[in-house]
Amino acid sequence: MNVILYCRQWGEAVAFYRDTLGFPPKLETDWLVEFEAGPNLCLSVADAKRTSIQPSGGAGITVTFKVANVRGVWQDLLGKDVKVEPIRDNRMGGLAFFLRDPEGNRLEFWAVSGMNEEAGIPGHV
């Protein structure tokens, strides 16, 4: 599965997903970067100036990532000066927190309570 986010702030979005979240690029062109966001899951950011599809500006989009250690991911991002919301109970059980990428897309990191497996996000353990 691949999710494509069309971005006005493409360079900032590429740096955020690559450097801040630690997603390794799988494919890089001069207008699109595809990142490995987990097993069998890619997240791509496309330069909206070079496409016929307009960006949503973050309206109506939430990309979620299931992790084993939500507190560890939260601490890591906080240490990188990323503006993260407080950790809270997830409506479906467990814990979650939210943040926005440079384009304004809402990201959720969540974990089921009591999970002991390794985190499922490249670059985060």
Image: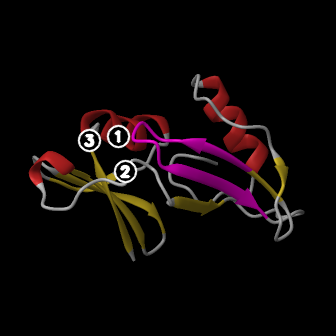
Could you tell me which residue is drawn at 66 percent across and 35 percent down? 84
Q: Residues within 10 Å of mark 3 (few under 14, many from 20)?
A: many
Q: Nearer the viewer, residue 8 or 79?
A: 8
**Secondary element at image label 1:** helix
Q: Give the magenta part as a residue range.
A: 97-111
Query: In the shown orientation, is residue 39 left or right of residue 107?
Result: left
Cα separation, mark 2 vs mark 3, equals 21 Å
Q: Could you tell whether 52 is left or right of 61 in the image?
A: left
Could you tell me which residue is drawn at 67 percent across and 59 percent down? Answer: 67
Question: What residue is pinned by disc 1?
Answer: 13
Q: Earlier in the sequence, mark 2 or mark 1?
A: 1
Question: Which amino acid is tagged 3?
Answer: Arg
Question: Magenta segment: does it hold 110?
Answer: yes
Residue found 26% across the figure and 41% down from its top: 8
Location of mark 3 (residue) = 8
The answer to which of 118 and 76 lies nearer the viewer is: 76
Please identify the quadrant where the N terminus is shown: bottom left
User: Which amino acid does the dot numbered 2 rest on?
Assistant: Pro
Q: Within the magenta stretch, is there residue 99?
A: yes
Q: Earlier in the sequence, mark 2 or mark 3?
A: 3
Question: Label 2 vs label 1: CA separation?
Answer: 14 Å
Q: Residues within 10 Å of mark 1 (few under 14, many from 20)?
A: many
Q: Secondary structure at mark 2?
A: loop
Q: Which mark is residue 24?
A: 2
Work out whether 32 lies above or below 94. above
Q: How many marks?
A: 3
Residue found 41% across the figure and 44% down from its top: 17
User: What percent of the width, then of the height, locates residue 10?
Assistant: 26, 40
Q: Position of residue 29 (x, y in %)?
A: 12, 52
Residue 116 is tagged as none
- Examine the rendered structure and indicate whether residue 110 appears above or below residue 47: below
